[in-house]
Image (cartoon, rainbow, N blue to C red):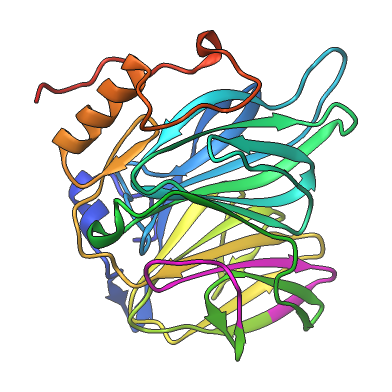
Amino acid sequence: MSDQIKDAEASSSLDCPVVDGRRQVQHVAARVAEVGGIPIHRVLPTRHRRLVGAWCFLDHAGPVVFKGDSRGLQVGPHPHIGLQTFTWMIAGEVLHRDSLGSEQVIRPGQVNLMTAGRGISHTEQSLPDDPQLHAAQLWIALPHAHRHTAPRFDHYPELPVWREEGVTLTLLVGELKGREAPTLTFSPLVGLDLAAERDTALSLPLRPEFEYALLPLEGEPTLEGEALAVDELAYLGRGRDALELELPAGARVLLIGGEPLGEEVLIWWNFVGHSKAEIAEAQREWEAGGERFGRVAGFTDDERLMPPPLPWTV
């Protein structure tokens, strides 16, 4: 899988092939879009790769510096079901508000985690005094057994951070090298940010039963002699027990992984579900203004974001 895969059937494969004794890498190009006024590169989901463990969505937002009269990131009230939203802040500050009454500014080095469960709505806004933003925003699909869990919001201002071989490692979720992040999970996962201060090489242990992917956020790292491009997801599959990376000074890489979910996951707009029927029901309730998703204080009904028509009938 050294080249970007064109065959949509490959998106369900968990194992990259071994060629001449070397396990291959699937390269997945990003789609460029804009969310809330911010340029983003989206690498999950695509037709080439739907899931990495329970990670089902990954946007690299920025880095961007706001100029002139730009208000930065402005995302109005919108709903979620069946997932956790996961924000890793690298630069800038964003205010999160939700229908539970949570109001939290996230700053660099911190994680915001919102568990939607059966239903929640929220907003995200840049602060006017900070003219920049750089973040990774991800979704984690809730397993079928937990899809209707009670909604909640968690903020993690302190995470395990250590240095190896000139690299600062921040464990965002899961366990690695005897360290454990406090982040709430519903399935086995790992997330790691690596920031190189100098040209260096680093080896990381992996769990063979996990599937993994790397996303370079800055710089041009090399994986076992193979160059990786910024904003191009490198899917590693399962069956690896170690990872050998070469990082130039200033490089930053996000590693995500997890135990394969083994369940069908559907994504439409801001909804994650296990059937078309439950997604359609959620969309109807949001459009009708029902109480399932609550209200975000300080916003009117006219400011709520609305989904496009469903692509199927139920």
Which of the pair 248/283 is nearer the observer?
283
Residue 314 percent location from the top left of the image: 9, 25
Q: In which quarter of the image is residue 283?
A: top left
Q: In which quarter of the image is residue 128?
A: top right
Residue drawn where x is 49% and y is 39% of the image = 42
Residue 215 percent location from the top left of the image: 55, 56
Residue drawn where x is 40% and y is 33% of the image = 270
Q: Does the magenta stretch include residue 3?
A: no
In the shown orientation, is residue 58 left or right of residue 147?
right
Residue 50 percent location from the top left of the image: 31, 49
In the shown orientation, is residue 246 left or right of residue 256?
right
Q: How many discs appear?
A: 0
Residue drawn where x is 29% and y is 68% of the image = 260
Residue 203 percent location from the top left of the image: 61, 84
Residue drawn where x is 32% and y is 15% of the image = 288
For this orientation, the residue located farthest to the right is: 129
For this orientation, the residue located farthest to the left is: 314
Residue 17 vertical placement versus 140 (above, below)? below
Residue 109 vertical placement versus 134 (above, below)? below
Which of the pair 101/50 is nearer the observer?
101
In the shown orientation, is residue 35 left or right of residue 160?
left
Q: Does the magenta stretch include residue 186?
A: yes
For this orientation, the residue located farthest to the bottom is: 178
Which span is picked out in magenta?
180-201
Residue 129 vertical placement versus 145 (above, below)? above
Of the 4 image quadrants, the one containing the N terminus is bottom left
In the shown orientation, is residue 142 left or right of residue 135?
left
